[in-house]
Image: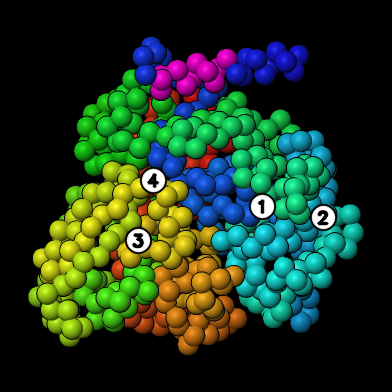
Amino acid sequence: MRHTSRFLAATAITGALAAFQPGLPAFAATPSDTLIQAWAIDDIISLDPAEVFEFTASELIGNSYETLIGYDVKDVSQIFGVVAESWEVSEDGKTLHFKVREGRKFASGNPITAADVVFSLTRAVKLDKSPAFILTQFGFSPENVDAQIVQTGDYTFDFKMDQAYAPSLVLYCLTATVASVVDQKLAMSHEANGDFGYDWLKTGYAGSGPFTIREWRANEVVVMERNDNYSGEAPKIARAIMRHIPEPAAQRLLLEQGDVDIARNLGPEEMEALSSNADIKSQAGVKGSIYYLGLNQKNEFLSKPQVRQAMKYLVDYAAISDTIMKGRAMVHQSFLPRGFLGEIDDTPFALNVAKAKELLAEAGVPDGFTVTMDTRNTADITAMGTAIQQTFGQAGIKLSLIPGDGGQTLTKYRARTHDIYIGQWGPDYQDPHTNADTFASNPDNKDGASSKTLAWRNSWDIPEMTARTRAAMLERDTGKRAEMYEALQREQQQDSPFVIMFQQVENVAVRANVQNFVLGPSFNDNSFKAVTK
């Protein structure tokens, strides 16, 4: 019976994918039990929750793993336990005592216990990949974490921190993908050279979410299947497929033909063309992710404060928002997205070439200079980069675009070998510290630092601002805390090597028969477990 079901599933997947293969006939419609999305998925570099930090992979992890804590995507202030049944805060505020729900299983059939949770959290700290700072900010290190996150019973454990942090901050951090609960027995069965199963889990799966990850072929496809051991309500569809189709025109054609159910990267022209098609509907959701330029302070020109500010006057925010990103982004120039505690709506910068030239002259480069920008080769980023190239040129800055796929540009950015990087950043959890910690904090600016925030990626050495960011995370008075974040943002707007431009509005085109696809505030909140067709 098991062999039969696997054969049928494989047959369905093969048929669903046929539409994407050159020379093969297209289907009139996708299978009724399968959701197929066309998307640019070249930013996936790993499927290990301890390493995942990019949008597409975050969505995959959000639909295939579970965390201790969750929240209502319609009201993020409503926090609830997922794997955790309950928790208590110690009198001194430094320890959270957790109880894990009994009776839950991983997709493998192994039971979920406190040992798995402790393993998952300590593993993330010891591996020390990019998102580890979400946990290490509470005083954990590879050397001390075994004594700080401690199992106290089959279904209980303690989370011991170095200071008394705001409980809501800690709980929101435990909703992040890096805090996903990993099947210890399965991961460790693939351990090699003390890597906690990392090499295997980069392309493997060891979770308990509504879907399993059956296959990932880089820059091609991800195939997910319903997890029959999922403890929540079973997904309505049997499988979900993401195809790497970066070209908006190709996405639109496949959607119109019925070969895909959802198109994720359509531009304003495609959305306008589809607006009169009764078989297609649009769906929008404001995201916490922001578009920005990161200016590497290792560059002799970009390290000049006047140059940094000049570049903030050399982006035509209104034109890009109204044309290239029409319906998909709104002008936003601070590191906290709208809707977060302490966010500000200030937009002090607009295209002003004369002002930029004055600043460049003050910096000693009145004739400009030559610089490069790494640009992910998706349609919107490419178009945005080209527009910025043109306005930079009006002030004498000769900007060369270096295109690459998401993995290539991210790898270079993480190595701090870029000049300028154009990218997106989305909150890892629903607390203002998530963005403050990466845009306004850099505890160690050395190349080999363990905390690799965006400030670090751009070599911005800011010990005083880092201290203020940490003070804001410890402040328990909500009003005072909001004021601290407001002040940080205004200073960061003027002085930082970040040109923050827009906040994303995710606007997708969906076949009319697809119901209950959820666009959440973060990409790991996007959900297709309730989808019906």
Assess whether mark 2 and mark 1 are in contact (beta carbons under 8 angstroms): no
- Residue 27: image quadrant is top left
Q: Quadrant of the N terminus?
A: top right
* Label 1, label 4: how far apart the Cα atoms are: 27 Å
- The amino acid on which the numbered mark 1 sits, given as a three-letter code, is Ser
- The amino acid on which the numbered mark 4 sits, given as a three-letter code, is Asp
- The amino acid on which the numbered mark 3 sits, given as a three-letter code, is Tyr
Eye-nearest disc, 2 or 3: 3
Residue 421's disc number: 3
Q: Is residue 211 visible?
A: no
Q: Is the residue 26 above or below the residue 96 in the image? A: above
Residue 282 x %, y % = 34, 37
- The amino acid on which the numbered mark 2 sits, given as a three-letter code, is Ala
**In the picture provided, is 14 more to the left or to the right than 494?**
right
Going from N to C along the chain, the mark reached first, 1 or 2, is 2
In the picture of the structure, the residue carrying the numbered disc 1 is 180
Classify 10 Å Cα crowding around label 2: few (below 14), some (14-19), many (20 and above): many
In the picture of the structure, the residue carrying the numbered disc 2 is 114
Element type where label 1 sits in the image: loop
Q: Is the residue 201 above or below the residue 155 in the image? A: above
* Label 4, label 2: how far apart the Cα atoms are: 39 Å
In the picture of the structure, the residue carrying the numbered disc 4 is 405
Residue 196 x %, y % = 74, 52
Q: Which residues are magenta?
A: 11-21
Going from N to C along the chain, the mark reached first, 1 or 4, is 1
Going from N to C along the chain, the mark reached first, 4 or 2, is 2
